[in-house]
């Protein structure tokens, strides 16, 4: 089912206006004095980029009742075009020709900026993880980039209790379906060109994961795809590609999730193609994340001994990863760094910046040096549970999980020491959107997006 999208033009730049058109009041008055004819009664006004309202009324008053706001030749040209192609809607190729308003019909005019964005293809990505349910809806802009027009995120803890029971609990499934119903409503209110809706570790490992997926389709109307760990690692790399700079020789990208942690080694020392995922030389998925680790070792009260035990547990798993040395030829280079995409690293960044409220714009892409990361881990380890709850970048939802995430981070840093860590508040959803748009040819067909 598709419903007309009313929001895609918000904040977009105006289109459909020639750069040579003067919009100053003096120029408009001059054109008004030169005009000899009035527009036909059925084609009263053309509105460029503004809704009818007070400004229109004031303009009519200045012109002593005249209702023509554009040159008669322009109206005539549009009228002729509509006559030749009846019923044709404006398209990007038509430069988003504005709709004409008939006083008899009372039909509101459409802003050209809204018309342009409405005609852009809309893509959607949903990621249901062990801890979070997240949705992004976006339209392509410049090559390799997109503009988010809707988003949703909620902590649902779908994997709560999974490590001990091996099954998704009824309460956890209810929470997830409640969030997914909101996502379904958002998707139904958009004319979606292509979408990919994925589920990760909780649904992969749960004995009743397939039953839950069927229930989601039945109750929320969404058909989720359970992806494998390799696909999850590739999507994380695709989503973080813009944060890897041109002169980079190698990156260890890690995604610390709720039920698993994906790690990809990316070698850029020889060449670089547009898709960063093409340069993955080795990857692994550890069957441990912040939720599972916190449930095993405890997340509310974490002593230094408990923290060290968590680090050691992850370290044993990492040492079993045969491909961990595949970047040894670049790890000593200043063009090598770590790239983390997860709530753990974004939380550390927020605490590091001493934010009064989490701000994605300041966190995404932030560089942290080795000493800064050490200090933040030490600070969090020194806080008790209530102090973690009180921090605005942690809060009650993450207070019992953040130290488990820090333990996974410390184990990763021990295997791949680096002077720099880049923080990414992006990941699977952005990777899905990038791949959908590239595969669909959205950037090739979008004139605004060409290089």
Image (cartoon, rainbow, N blue to C red):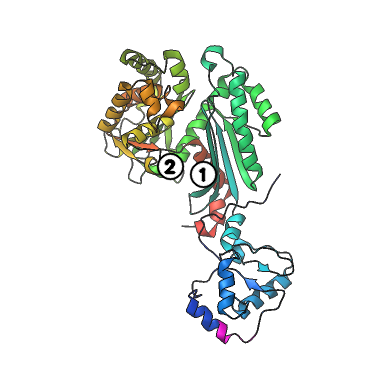
**Is residue 302 placed above or below 388 in the rendered structure?**
above
Q: Quadrant of residue 403?
A: top left
Mark found first going from the N terminus, 2 or 1: 2
Circles 2, 1 touching at the beta carbon (< 8 Å): yes
131 relative to 306 in the view: left or right: right
**Is residue 389 placed above or below 27 in the rendered structure?**
above
53 relative to 249 in the view: left or right: right
Image point 39% across, 33% down: which residue?
392
Find residue 276 and report its horizontal and vertical position in percent.
Answer: 44, 41
Image point 54% across, 21% down: which residue?
159
> How many C-alpha atoms fall within 10 Å of the one at disc 1: few (<14), some, or many (≥20)?
many
Find residue 298 and report its horizontal and vertical position in percent.
Answer: 42, 15
Which of the labelled discs sits on residue 434, or is there none? Answer: 1
Q: Quadrant of residue 290?
A: top left
> How many C-alpha atoms fall within 10 Å of the one at disc 2: few (<14), some, or many (≥20)?
some
Q: Which residues are magenta?
A: 32-38
Find residue 408 and report its horizontal and vertical position in percent.
Answer: 38, 23
Q: Which residue is mark 2?
A: 241
Instruction: Depth check: give the residue in front, 98 or 427.
Output: 98
Assign a secondary structure to mark 2.
Answer: helix
């Amino acid at each position: 089912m598709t419903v007309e999208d009313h929001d895609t033009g918000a904040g977009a730049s105006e289109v459909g206006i020639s750069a040579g058109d003067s919009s100053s009041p003096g120029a408009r008055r001059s054109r008004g004095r030169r005009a000899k004819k009035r527009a036909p009664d059925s084609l009263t006004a053309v509105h460029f980029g503004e809704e009818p309202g007070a400004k229109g009324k004031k303009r009519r008053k200045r012109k002593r009742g005249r209702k023509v706001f554009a040159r008669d030749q322009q109206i005539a040209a549009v009228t002729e075009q509509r006559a030749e192609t009846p019923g044709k809607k404006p398209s990007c190729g038509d430069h988003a020709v504005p709709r004409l308003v008939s006083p008899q019909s009372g039909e509101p005019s459409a802003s050209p900026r809204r018309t342009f964005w409405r005609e852009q293809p809309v893509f959607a990505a949903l990621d249901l993880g062990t801890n979070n349910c997240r949705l992004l809806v976006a339209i392509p802009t410049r090559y390799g980039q997109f503009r988010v027009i809707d988003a949703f995120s909620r902590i649902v803890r779908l994997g709560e209790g999974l490590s001990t029971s091996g099954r998704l609990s009824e309460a956890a499934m209810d929470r997830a379906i409640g969030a997914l119903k909101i996502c379904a409503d958002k998707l139904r209110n958009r004319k979606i060109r292509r979408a990919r809706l994925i589920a990760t570790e909780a649904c992969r490992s749960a004995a009743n994961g397939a039953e839950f997926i069927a229930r989601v389709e039945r109750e929320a109307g969404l058909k989720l795809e359970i992806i494998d760990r390799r696909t999850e690692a590739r999507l994380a790399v695709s989503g973080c590609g813009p944060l890897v700079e041109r002169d980079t020789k190698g990156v260890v990208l890690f995604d610390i999730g709720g039920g698993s942690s994906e790690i990809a080694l990316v070698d850029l020392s020889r060449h670089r193609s547009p898709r960063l995922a093409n340069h993955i030389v080795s990857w692994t998925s550890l069957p441990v994340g912040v939720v599972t680790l916190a449930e095993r070792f405890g997340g509310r009260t974490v002593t230094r001994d408990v923290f060290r035990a968590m680090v050691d547990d992850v370290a044993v798993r990492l040492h079993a990863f045969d491909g961990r040395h595949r970047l040894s030829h670049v790890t000593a280079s200043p063009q090598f760094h770590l790239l983390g995409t997860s709530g753990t690293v974004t939380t550390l960044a927020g605490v590091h910046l001493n934010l009064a409220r989490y701000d994605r714009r300041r966190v995404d892409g932030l560089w942290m040096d080795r000493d800064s990361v050490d200090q933040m881990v030490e600070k969090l380890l020194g806080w008790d549970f209530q102090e973690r709850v009180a921090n605005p970048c942690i809060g009650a939802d993450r207070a019992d999980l953040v130290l488990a995430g820090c333990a996974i981070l410390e184990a990763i840093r021990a295997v791949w020491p680096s002077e720099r860590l880049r923080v990414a508040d992006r990941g699977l959803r952005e990777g899905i959107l990038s791949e959908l748009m590239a595969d669909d040819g959205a950037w090739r067909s979008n004139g605004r997006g060409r290089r």
